Amino acid sequence: MTIVCQHMSIGINTVRKVAMLAFALFFTGTMASQVGKAILSVEVLDASDRSPLEGVQVAITPCLCGGITDRGGKFTTELSQGNYQVEFFYLGFKGVTREVELREAMQITVVMEEAAEELSEVVLQAKRITQNIESPQMGALQLEMKEIKKIPMAVGEMDVLRGMTLMPGVNSAGEISNGLSVRGGSLDQNLILYDYAPIFNPTHLFGLISVFTPEVVSQVDLYRANIPSRYGGRVSSVLDVKSRNPYPDRFRMSGGIGLISSRLAIETPLIKDKLNFSVGGRAGFTDFLLPIVSERLDNTKAQFYDTTFKLIWLASQKDQLMLSGFYAWDFYQLDMITRIQEVNAKNNQYRFKTLNGTLSWTHSFDTKSSMRQVFVASNYSPENILPEQDNPNEIRYSSGIRYLGSTTEYLRFPSEKVDWHAGVQAVKYIIEPGDLDPGSGNSINPVTLETENGYEFAAYGNLNLKPLEKLSISAGIRLNHFVLVGPFDQPTFDPETGNLIGNTLFEKGAGVKTYNNLEPRLGLNYSLGEHASLKASYARLNQYLQNIYNTTTPLPTSRWKLADPLIEPQQSDAFGLGVYQGLADDRIEISLEGYYRKSRNNMAYKAGADFFLEPYLQREVIQGEGAAYGVEVGLRKPDGKVNGWVNYTYARSFLRSNGELLSERINDNNWYPSEFDRPHVFNSTVNFEGDLYNTWSFNFTLQSGRPYSAPNGVFRYRDIDVPIFIERNNARMRPYHRLDLSWKVRYGKKLNRSWIGDWTFTVYNVYGRRNPFNLFYSQRQGSVNGDIFLDSPLGSYELSVLNSPVLSLTYNFTFN
């Protein structure tokens, strides 16, 4: 028998609750007759995301017994058959009372909601601080959507990725960036998951905002150190985004209307206590705004939408099925002339599509063990459209990634001091590198690059153990087996000249190359007292799929590539050490983390590399070693009318080639800064919650400028001055800094009414800082700008995405 319940009222008098609970806990285990016994099992979940709640106090009368829930949100006791009143208390949540008629073994699932007061959010964050101090997991960051909503964002959009860039050790390439750099890693070295399925392009609007549907996102977890063994396939970090589970007993609608986009989400039970459904969507059509920003954007277009749905079926008291889907679509047009094989295109159009699906089944064997089976499918298909200048024909260049995966995992919670899980995974990659369709034109030949196929199999296990009162251990192991299969065209290059001298063809299904790797993971936590701890971590990771590009951020023409006999999988060993201190009853956390990451087979492009329609990508890239290290200092205060966080990071990220041929050397095989080397980064987010109706939020970020390649000289060719680039990333742009603010106005005096609305006014880049995004060089015309460039034959010019404040106004609402 399963009872799913949600209680809306605040409950009985607080004093009576505490007194009764203390009395009940004191007498836990009162003797009863051994005749007519039955087991009562309880599972307590958070209503916002259906996650288990640990530490919920359970009081049972009239036996005057009870206890608290474990890590899995579960509590079990044996009682005499009869009628009982079971009450559930958890700080920051509404109390729940259940009347139970116990005649046989019974399981109750209780869903607890946060209290109406906004202070519950503070309590939850304080609880997370306590968990961070006590957990052996190191380098883990978590943001809930209600925290992200407070952060002032560009164009007023709630954004997962932008929120993460305010965390220590996380940054991007600027206002326009197609992903994250975590602790000096490249953009493709992060595994981004949305309800277990991978996301290969996480942004809309040229990289300005992320693709995750804001209204349905529940929480975001970023792992940077001893990444749990259930994750693999990337060498830098894992960003795990979860959508919110629908409410089980009532209709709920929420959304928002803004200048850039509008969004709507609906949650409703289809069959009470059995089948629940939610769907959310967002659409943005910004064509009319772009000419207002600049006359040069008259012919620039940008449109996007995304949608997420989730269906949960409570098949029985021990089984739950979940089906979720995600679709994102982007189109934008740049008003610039592009030349492809002697044909001019009047503009450049880009189209992206992502279609993901997840099916999971969770089975509970008993209160201490469960199993989860997950199937995922992901399809990412970018396209570049080039309309010809003199006729209606369109040239299309398309590529794609298809991903199929299966995970089976068993979880066991024997006691409060021991829990473990183990599982197996299987993944199939299908990479379509590129297809050029000339349309009706006859001046360009069609080209189709060969599809790549690969399989990755893994077995993993993780043990969380507390052998001593002050020591906690998290130990994991992961065994990977990767195989590249045919059809495949394997090139052979002359070792002295690097020229192509032959190739080997593999038939469909034939094994081309196999890699086996063992990945140990370890996290240690030693308690230095009730509110302080010392942590250490180690993790080895391997990456068999890489994105190769020679621009600041990946474009649709960038290439995805599987490991093969010549391109080996990337590998890293990451070490970490940290100290954590909780202050003011753990409502404030101070942290100090240091890390060092040594990596091998990092991808880099050769000088003058051209990936477009290149059949043998191996001759355009080289692999080298990398080193990244840094120290992160953070202070987090979620409590009070003034709350937020401040962090500073000193970090370095370097690469080095090891090639023998001149064409395979970068900076003569000396260490050089990577694209994401930022020695100094300071972030601050402060929220002023003056009253129930007004919240002011401020962001400030300051970081060292991004490295770039400055010419080492100039030579003249046919009356044109041509720059000579010998060294890579030998100069650095001006520092990046920006101040943002938002003002949230909530109206209405009745906080428990059905319709709740608020207005959010945002100013991004308050003082109009012209932050450099890139630099380019151009032939000087006469003496123009002579006072700046002096006698230099070339002029260098900064390219900035924003040079003025960006204002936005958004209306948000919730209806229950």
Image (cartoon, helix red, strand yellow):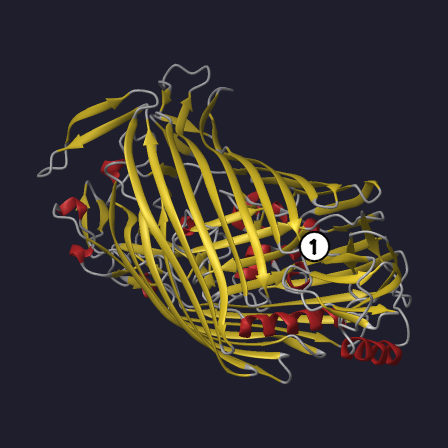
Image quarter for residue 343? Answer: top left
Q: Position of residue 99 (x, y in %)?
A: 89, 59
496 w.r.t. 57: above or below:
above
Q: Which residue is mark 1?
A: 49
Of residues 43 and 403, which is closer to you in this image? 43
Q: Position of residue 624 (x, y in %)?
A: 24, 51
Q: Position of residue 244 (x, y in %)?
A: 69, 51
Q: For this view, does 21 lie left or right of residue 667?
A: right
Of residues 364 and 121, which is closer to you in this image? 364
Q: For this view, does 55 lie left or right of residue 616?
A: right
Of residues 339 and 365, which is closer to you in this image? 365
78 w.r.t. 437: above or below:
below
Residue at screen point 77% across, 79% down: 26
Residue at screen point 66% across, 58% down: 145
Three-letter code for the amino acid on which mark 1 is drawn: Asp
Residue at screen point 70% across, 45% down: 318
User: Within 10 angstroms of label 1, few (less than 14), some, or many (20 or more) residues?
Assistant: some
647 w.r.t. 665: above or below:
below
Of residues 379 and 17, which is closer to you in this image? 17
